[in-house]
Image (cartoon, grey):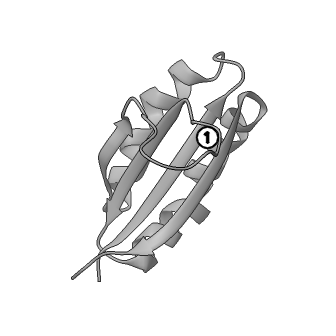
Amino acid sequence: MTAFVIGQMMIHDRGWMDEYFAKIPDVVARHGGAFRVRGGAPERMEGDAPLPHAAFIIEFPDRDHATAFWNSDAFQSLALLRRPGSTLDALLVDGLD
């Protein structure tokens, strides 16, 4: 069953962004994933949680591929680069296969 990683990001410092965004598409693709939304100019439709600076949706063939991506050394090294300059909330959800 298709799985999606859905994230909302607050950006506190942009120093990490050039390197991270240059490398992340290849890391996602190596795990069978594809960005369906990246950045996305978030606009509030409902609720009162802080509006994120960026949002993303990554599609994977299944949860195993998504989990392998998230736990990979390549992604975790990029996450270490990103974390001092951002806050990320991410979810793994099943698609409607």
Q: Badge 1 local density, few (<14 within 10 Å), some, or many (20+)?
A: some
Residue at 44% across / 79% down in the picture?
64
User: Foreground residue, 4 or 77?
Assistant: 4
Q: Residue furthest right?
A: 84
User: Foreground residue, 2 or 64?
Assistant: 2
Q: Percent x, y for residue 93? A: 44, 73
Residue at 46% across / 41% down in the picture?
55
Q: Percent x, y for residue 32? A: 31, 62
- Quadrant location of the C terminus in the rendered image: bottom left
- Quadrant location of the N terminus in the rendered image: bottom left
* Drawn side of residue 14 relative to residue 55, left or right: right
Residue at 25% across / 79% down in the picture?
96
Vertical relation: 81 (above or below) 71: above
Query: What kind of residue is marked 1?
Result: Leu
Residue at 36% across / 34% down in the picture?
40
Q: Percent x, y for residue 81? A: 69, 34
Quadrant of residue 86 in the image? top right
| Secondary structure of residue under mark 1 | helix
* Drawn side of residue 19 relative to residue 13, left or right: left
Q: Percent x, y for residue 9? A: 59, 39
Q: Which residue is mark 1?
A: 78
* Drawn side of residue 22 relative to residue 91, left or right: left
Quadrant of residue 5 in the image? bottom left
Vertical relation: 54 (above or below) 14: below
